Image: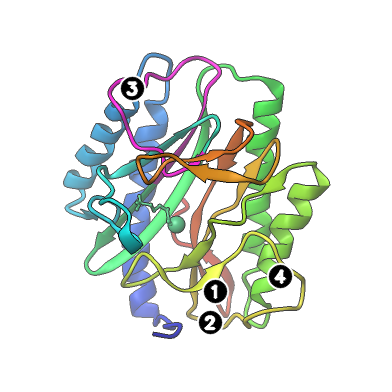
Amino acid sequence: MGIVLKSERELAKMREAGLIVRAVLDAVEAACVPGVSTAELNAIAERELRRAKASSAFLGYAPGGAPPYPAVLCTSVNAVVVHGIPDRRQVLREGDVVGIDFACYKDGYCADAARTVAVGIVSAPARALISATQECLERAIRACVPGARLGDVGAAIQGHAEELGYSIVREFVGHGIGRAMHEPPSVPNHGREGSGLRLRPGMVLAIEPMLNVGGADVRVLHDGWTVVTADASLSAHVEHTVAVTDDGPRVLTAA
Ligand code: MF3
Ligand code: CO
């Protein structure tokens, strides 16, 4: 299937899902303190999901032969890039950097977002990485205007990340989103300005830069999900669901 443009009515539904995603991430972020386990963070996400009468986009998700994802939240600590599985034995400690990623369906439409959170006081390099990753996302969002191209979005991320000396993960990318969590097109975190698909009003993209302090290479652990940096360097990931509209970018998972 090709790219599905969304009507204003559909964008309104995706906004409902986006507000739930935001509320869940707010609750989880507030709980990212030393001593909490990543399984407890997942339990908080489950509780908020129930409260909102929404359904998880992650639980049981099994793309292309992967084992079904066993939780509603991804918790990616330090050298884990994305898709970390919550675990009762994994307890957050002061100085950790934790990515929290959540998506849900409400009334048939999906929204998807992620943040990277500092646990207590973290090192200056960790703080800088988190800020840079957020800046990359903000720049990418600003590029989401009708007439621009997908390469402009990737270039905005790549240009800023590389200027600051970070590397970009290539194996995992952002995506179109709507009735399904993953729709075309793929949204790479690198690219060339002026190249690629032309953005049109009604396109909705989940943009999710992943930046590493060290090299770009990653590997997947034997659980089939956890993505780690090959050199064990620190990594950060943030994501928003963004609609391209005639009035400019509309971030469906933000305040
Ligand atoms: N936000 C991620 C993505 O867009 C998380 C999906 S992995 C899952 O691909 F298994 F948890 F669903
Ligand atoms: Co996503």
The amino acid pointed to by label 3 is Ser
Residue stretch rendered in magenta on the structure: 81-101
Label 2 crowding class (10 Å Cα cut-off): few <14, some 14-19, many 20+? Answer: many
Q: CA distance from mark 4 to mark 2?
A: 16 Å
**Residue at image mark 2:** 201
**Residue at image mark 4:** 152
The circle drawn on residue 104 is none
The amino acid pointed to by label 2 is Pro
Q: Position of residue 16 (x, y in %)?
A: 32, 61
Q: Is label 4 in a helix, a strand or a loop?
A: helix
- Say if disc 2 is inside 8 Å of ligand 2: no
Magenta span has 178?
no
Disc number lying in front (1 or 3): 3
Q: Is label 2 in a helix, a strand or a loop?
A: loop
Q: Position of residue 175 (x, y in %)?
A: 48, 66
Q: CA distance from mark 2 to mark 3?
A: 41 Å
Label 3 crowding class (10 Å Cα cut-off): few <14, some 14-19, many 20+? Answer: many
Of 9 and 237, nearer the camera is 237
For the residues bearing labels 1 and 2, Cβ distance under 8 angstroms: yes
Above or below 87: residue 217? below
The circle drawn on residue 244 is 1
Q: CA distance from mark 1 to mark 3?
A: 37 Å
Q: Position of residue 170 (x, y in %)?
A: 62, 56
Instruction: Name the residue rendered at 64%, 31% in the picture.
Output: 233
The disc, 1 or 4, on the residue closer to the chain's N-terminal end is 4
**Residue at image mark 3:** 37
- How many tags in the picture? 4
Q: Is label 1 in a helix, a strand or a loop?
A: strand
The amino acid pointed to by label 1 is Val
The disc, 4 or 3, on the residue closer to the chain's N-terminal end is 3
Q: CA distance from mark 1 to mark 4?
A: 14 Å
